[in-house]
Image: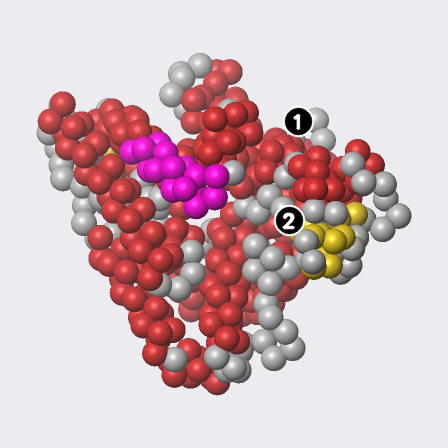
Amino acid sequence: MITFIRNIFIIPELRKRVIFTFLLLAVYRMGSQIITPGINIEAMAQLFERAKDTIFGFIDMFSGQNMGRMTIFALGIMPYISASIILQLLQVVWPYLERISKEGELGKKKITQYTRYGTVFISIIQSFGIALFIERLDFNGIPVVLNSGWGFRLLTMLTLTTGTMFLMWLGEQISERGIGNGISLIIYAGIVVGLVPGVLDTLRGLRSGETSPLTIIFLLAFMLVVTGFICYVEMGQRRIPVSYAKRVQGRRMMGGQSTFLPLKVNTGGVIPIIFASSVIIFPSTIASAIEHPIAYTIREQLGYGMPFYNLLYLVCIIFFTYFYVSIIFNPQDVSDNLKKYGGFIPGIRAGKNTAEYIDNVLSKLTFIGAIYLAVVAIIPTFLMMGFKLGALPFVGDWLEANLPRFINDGLGVRFYFGGTSLLIVVGVAMDTVQQIEAQLTMRNYETFSKKGKIRGRRG
């Protein structure tokens, strides 16, 4: 490790890229201390603590805890991610975008431009909705907004939209002139910074005697095992052998080589969890705005950590894993490209049979990936509060009385390090190390892994 870090700073170009990346991340953290004008900070913080299990709590995780304090980066980079996902989905159903995406570098620039326009549009809509929402809030009679009205709304829209566009620019600069994926690193920085208060709170519990040393040791070991498991699965691939027939092109003999088609176990990445989290939070958020006994029951049963919440969450993750993978990976296109360049899978007839074979293999891998995502996503719920099986109707009392206490009540962890955040932190770290290793390998320096190159999420 020490040699790896030293080698990074030996190479001038790599050293400049790493320092540039850290400086821009520092700018991001400095901007996170600037509060949106017209906000009562204390009242906003108290109210947001109550709303952490709604859609705003989900946004706050990706914004680096900026949403709860209503800083200029309150929207974070989520509008950009949403616009990117929407453009990616539209490329499948809109022939115009599909054609542009296949035009090489020029098409990529157009897609990026459309993504920026979409980011501005989504930021304006979200910031306007947030301004209207917080205008109605008060804490113990103290309004969150000091001077409500169209002046505050327009200023909030301008501030939050500009903050998101500035973050997008920072991410693009890091990707171009720094090291790693800039957008991912901004999310990574926000999540890691949010962990620090939680860790300190856990240590205070250890000092006060609320948390036993044995629990801390078990927690550290458990998190280490889970992190290693995520790294192992994220690097997992199914390599389908592909051979290319020999053919004469002009005076040259082409083909005759063998390679492989890599299919990742977790092809969908973290996107299915993001989709599932967004969908499952909406019912409780809508129900919280309705004063009715039925709405209260829905809000209670779909509260964070409740059994029906967990069940619906797992089902949504599995569904969106298959849905997203079916959109971003088309076995028929892969089969056509192999056939076009003279490639074939040994023992499989080219064309329709090849597409069916790839689809069959991908379906099995997707099932494993979906279960993996579901397990990782439910781990933080177990650590923090357990599965609360006692809340189930009819059988809840029996389950609570006969099952071990830690299954119902959890381990009492004081901070959220959930499936989405854990996958992002591990995945971004792997991608960044992969890019650094590529730079070191080109210059014949010793890398982090002596046994071989680390495969990031992109393979």
Q: Is any part of residue 224 visible from this angle?
A: yes
In the rendered image, residue 209, in percent from the top left (x then y), is placed at 46, 65
- In the picture, residue 161 is in which quadrant? top left
In the rendered image, residue 375, in percent from the top left (x then y), is placed at 65, 47
Q: Which residues are magenta?
A: 103-120
Magenta span: chief secondary structure: helix
Q: Is residue 372 left or right of residue 288?
A: right
Q: Is residue 167 shown above or below 429?
A: above
Name the residue nearer the viewer: 273 or 292: 273
Name the residue nearer the viewer: 435 or 390: 435
In the image as oriented, which residue stretches furthest toward the front? 251
Q: Is residue 46 left or right of residue 230?
A: left
Q: Which label is found at residue 379?
A: none
Q: Is residue 93 left or right of residue 35?
A: right
- In the picture, residue 119 is in which quadrant? top left
Q: Residues within 10 Å of mark 2 (few under 14, many from 20)?
A: many
In the rendered image, residue 455, in percent from the top left (x then y), is placed at 60, 63
| Three-letter amino acid code of the residue under disc 1 | Pro
Q: Residue at x 11, y 27 (%)?
A: 151
Q: Residue at x 14, y 23 (%)?
A: 150
Q: Is residue 315 shown above or below 23?
A: above
Element at label 2: loop
Q: How many numbered marks have been drawn onto this rendered protein structure?
A: 2
Q: Is residue 384 shown above or below 125?
A: below
Q: Which label is found at residue 393?
A: 1
The residue that disc 2 covers is 266
Q: Residues within 10 Å of mark 1 (few under 14, many from 20)?
A: few
Q: Is residue 84 magenta?
A: no
Element at label 1: loop
Q: Residue at x 39, y 51 (%)?
A: 183
Q: Quadrant of the C terminus?
A: bottom right
C-alpha distance separating marks 1 and 2: 35 Å
